[in-house]
Image: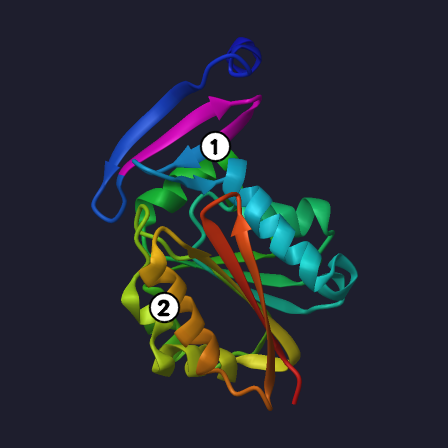
Amino acid sequence: MIRKVFSYLIPIKIFQKKSSRSKMIEVTWANGELVLDSENTNYSYGSLQRILRYGLRNIGFKTIQEMNHILVLGVAGGSVIKTLIDEIQFRGKITGVEIDADMIQIANEYFNLSQIKQLEIIIDDAFEFVLKTKNQYDLIIIDVFEDTNMPNFLFERFFSERVLSLLKKQGFVLFNTMILDEKHNIRNRKYISEINAELYSTKMLPRVEQHNELIIIEKVA
């Protein structure tokens, strides 16, 4: 409790671990809440939770409540999962895919992720999982980072089309991207241009928490 109180004055680091996938992982008390960070960016809770909450609000909390199965690519500490369950009151199944087993161990220990009964965690590469899965999803949340870097495969047309093929009718994709320079702006515009406008509607929510741009895709046909 003392750490929590003092964290409103200064961040208090309580855990640090090197990870082969994410380099350094840190758990910190900041502004009265536990957050999970990599070396250079927020991974869960804190600003990331606000970013993804904003995207979910744009989709509509009531719309999400009526869904049956949500896929989360990139779990980290599980802040978006906590938002879905605690704030939105989503009661369906959540499948979370995370490549970094160390990250899930920390999420279980510090953020009680293992106590969520409707959540299935799969340790796998997001690209490989998307190729293998035979399920259909109402909502696919893409939040895959390696520190501040986003893997190139996320923006490749083959991967994008495969993700979209996993959507149920009137399903959504919520894609969290980071914009650090003009190349990233061009990358995102190209990504949007390759989506079939007859089958999907797209919305871009730029400059969320300064450097993030959310892309929302809805299957309309």
Residue under the point 23% across and 35% down: 18
The tag earlier along the polypeptide, 2 or 1, is 1
Position in image of residue 127 (x %, y %): 34, 71
Nearest the camera: 152 or 75?
152
Residue 68 pos. (x, y %): 68, 69
Q: Residue at x 40, y 75 (%)?
A: 190
Residue 116 makes an appearance in the image: no
Task: Find numbered disc 2 in the image and state the secondary structure of the residue it sits on.
Answer: helix
Q: Are marks 2 and 1 in contact (CB under 8 Å)?
A: no
Q: Is residue 28 magenta?
A: yes
Q: Which residue is mark 2?
A: 187
Residue at disc 1, secondary structure: strand
Front label number (2 vs 1): 2
Residue 193 on the magenta span: no
**Viewer-closest of 101 and 215:** 215
- Which of the pair 154/118 is nearer the observer? 154
How has the structure been colored for display?
A: rainbow
Residue type indicated by callout 1: Val
Callout 2, which amino acid? Arg
| Residue nearer the viewer, 150 or 67 | 150
Magenta region, residue range: 24-34
Give the CA distance from mark 2 to mark 1.
29 Å
Rendered position, 45 above or below 145: above
Q: Which residue is mark 1?
A: 35
User: Is the residue 100 above or below the residue 41 in the image?
Assistant: below
| Residue depicted at x 39% and y 37% | 106
How many marks on residues?
2
